[in-house]
Amino acid sequence: MVISQSTIFLLILFLLGLIGKNQSIMIAVYVLAGLKLFKLDEKVFPFFESKGMSIGVTIITISVLIPIATGEIGFKELAGSVKSYYAWICLGAGMFVAFVARDGLSLLASDPQLTTALIIGTILAVVFFNGVAVGPLIGAGIAYMAMRLVDGIVKLF
């Protein structure tokens, strides 16, 4: 049996998840390794790669909307929340990340090598800082904004 570079990389990620006690990384690696082991990777990986982010965002959205579906949050709570400046901060933050993520799409499409660095950064934060992998899209958007800012500063000098 030949062990590929990708398998070794997955094993390292699993060990990092184990060291960092991060179940999400360990489960993700376990699933990916299992798909490779059963030779389902060529059929399933392209689907996950193209639709996984959308499916993940949909699942997160469902979990966030459950209090509305159960009636725990209604129009009364909504009206009450906009009286708080925290609610206005959250509204602005939501709008900001959606706006920033827009530029992330073009960055990921135009420079795949940056995607690798972004993913490694996400994995390191998840494993060592108990971060949450919210997806490379927002990270790419933030990176895009930072790169434009640095480009602008460099041009001044």
Image (spheres, helix red, strand yellow):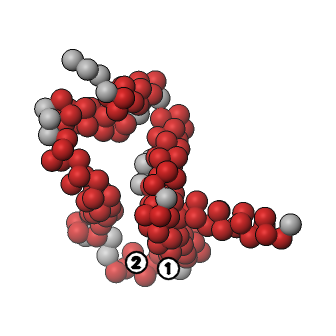
Q: Secondary structure at mark 2?
A: helix
Viewed as shown, does residue 40 lie left or right of 145? left
Q: Which residue is rendered at x = 40% and y = 78% of the image? A: 78
User: Residue 118, percent across and down?
Assistant: 51, 49
Circle 2 packing at 10 Å, graded few (<14), some (14-19), many (20+), is few
Q: Amino acid at mark 1?
A: Val
Q: Nearer the viewer, residue 65 or 131?
A: 131
Q: Quadrant of residue 155?
A: bottom right
Circles 2, 1 touching at the beta carbon (< 8 Å)? yes
**Taking 103 as reference, is 33 above or below it?**
above
Q: Which residue is rendered at x = 39% and y = 75% of the image? A: 77
Q: Which residue is rendered at x = 34% and y = 80% of the image? A: 75
Give the residue pinned by disc 2: 78
Q: Amino acid at mark 2?
A: Leu
Q: Kindly identify which numbered label has been placed on residue 82.
A: 1
Marks 2/1: CA–CA distance: 7 Å
